[in-house]
Amino acid sequence: RKEVEQDPGPFNVPEGATVAFNCTYSNSASQSFFWYRQDCRKEPKLLMSVYSSGNEDGRFTAQLNRASQYISLLIRDSKLSDSATYLCVVKGINNDMRFGAGTRLTVKP
Amino acid sequence: DAMVIQNPRYQVTQFGKPVTLSCSQTLNHNVMYWYQQKSSQAPKLLFHYYDKDFNNEADTPDNFQSRRPNTSFCFLDIRSPGLGDAAMYLCATSREMYTQYFGPGTRLTVL
């Protein structure tokens, strides 16, 4: 079993749609959680950290369920510019960062 | 602007010919990382420096080495590149082990 698993995707949605990505992690001792965004042939960039109480940044909402070892990212009112690959990242007890394989999102006009 | 810089952005080498990729940062972060990312795959951590302490991932081949002469610079040396080493190599930095910031990457082609 992979340490971090994400929805395989790809997700193709129209502008304005709401889309949700899921991620599960295998190590229950994991400490911190992040969503990164990666555009084609570019480097990953931090989208948001994920806190136990859930957090929101504009159109983006991240949720963490430690009991189920599950993280989610919700994007509301999708824009064309949201098209990218979204990487789920989990930091373990040794401070090592483990990346999911990513879920590709394409937002169409 | 403070940033993570990687040079070159594109590197072409021949099978078995040593190659060095460089990373520099103006963030004054004490931790620097090297990742390998192949097409449609997750970035894979090769190793990281916590200050001067080198931390190698267990499954990183011996073909990959790294040097960190000072806080700002870190190098990735591939001693004998094989066709399977063609990938994007990403450098990242962090203050302690907090949020990582990535450079633009070096795309390596092995002929």
Image (spheres, coloured by chain):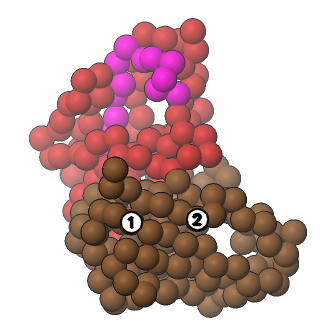
On the image, which quarter does residue B63 sit in?
Answer: bottom right
Query: Is disc 1 surrounded by few (<14), some (14 to 19) or many (20+) residues within 10 Å?
Result: many
Q: Which mark is residue B7?
A: 2
Residue placed farthest to the front in the image? B1
Q: Where is residue B109 in the image (x, y as percent from the top left)?
A: 77, 64
* Total marks placed: 2
Amino acid carrying label 2: it is: Asn
| Magenta region, residue range | A69-83
Secondary structure beneath dot 2 equals strand
- Judge the density around disc 2: few (<14), some (14-19), many (≥20) Cα neighbours within 10 Å: some
Residue A8 percent coordinates (x, y): 56, 41
Residue B18 lies in magenta, yes or no?
no
Q: Report if residue B107 is visible in the image.
A: yes
What residue type is disc 1 on? Gln
- Residue B45 in sight here: no
* Residue in the image at 78% along x and 66% along y: B12
| Image location (x, y in percent) of residue B50 | 31, 81
Does residue B2 appear to the left or right of A100 in the view shown? left
Q: Mark 1 points at which residue?
A: B25
Spatial CA distance of label 1 from label 2 is 12 Å
